[in-house]
């Protein structure tokens, strides 16, 4: 029961991340905290990279939880799964690419993180 509840909450949060990423991708950067967008001049480019990064992160988290749910494993044993489950490995790649895109958008369009 606990695992199903955690899975539901995790997937719901991932879907929320995807929806937020779509909103940012379309150019509305208001959900991003103000000090992370203070020096942004090209709002469209910044929104596209940040939005795509959040979308990929949300997809990665959703796929990761589905993979862990289908293989009946916990997140604590993820290092063992990475060698055996390509689905889990792909979801981790989605998450890392999303993080890299967010960092790239912050450095390129905001001239740093703060």
Image (cartoon, grey):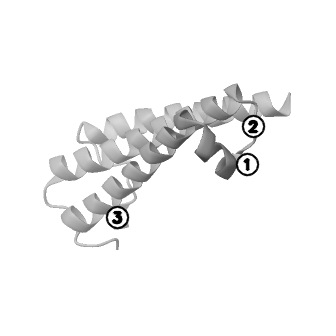
Whether residue 90 is visible, yes or no, is: yes
Return the disc, 3 or 1, that comes first in the chain's sequence: 3
Residue contact between numbered discs 3 and 1, judged by CB atoms under 8 Å: no
Disc 2 to disc 1, how far (Cα)? 7 Å
Name the secondary structure under disc 1. Answer: helix
- Residue that protrudes farthest toward the right in the picture: 1
Q: Which residue is mark 2?
A: 73
Q: Residue at x 23, y 44 (%)?
A: 48
Q: Which residue is mark 1?
A: 77
The quarter of the picture where the C terminus appears is bottom left
Q: Is residue 102 above or below residue 64?
A: below
Foreground residue among 93 and 81: 81
Residue contact between numbered discs 2 and 1, judged by CB atoms under 8 Å: yes
Camera-side mark, 2 or 3: 2
Camera-side mark, 3 or 1: 1
Disc 2 to disc 3, how far (Cα)? 36 Å
Q: Residue at x 36, y 67 (%)?
A: 35
Neighbor class of circle 1 (other Cα within 10 Å; few <14, some 14-19, many 20+) is: few
Neighbor class of circle 2 (other Cα within 10 Å; few <14, some 14-19, many 20+) is: some
- Which numbered circle lies on residue 36? 3
Position of residue 37 in the picture relative to residue 92 (left or right): left
Q: Is residue 79 above or below residue 103?
A: above
- Residue that protrudes farthest toward the front in the picture: 84
Foreground residue among 76 and 114: 76
- Which numbered circle lies on residue 46? none
Whether residue 37 is visible, yes or no, is: no
Position of residue 14 in the picture relative to residue 98 (left or right): right
Foreground residue among 32 and 74: 74
Disc 3 to disc 1, how far (Cα)? 34 Å
The quarter of the picture where the N terminus appears is top right
């Amino acid at each position: 029961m606990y695992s199903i509840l955690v899975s539901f909450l995790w997937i719901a949060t991932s879907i929320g991340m995807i929806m937020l990423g779509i909103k940012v991708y379309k150019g509305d950067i208001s959900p991003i905290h103000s000090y992370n967008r203070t020096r942004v001049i090209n709002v469209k480019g910044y929104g596209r990279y940040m939005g795509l990064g959040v979308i990929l992160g949300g997809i990665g988290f959703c796929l990761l939880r589905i993979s862990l749910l289908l293989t009946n494993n916990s997140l604590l044993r993820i290092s063992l799964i990475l060698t055996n489950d390509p689905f889990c490995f792909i979801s981790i790649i989605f998450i890392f690419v999303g993080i890299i895109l967010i960092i790239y958008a912050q450095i390129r369009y905001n001239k740093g993180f703060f």
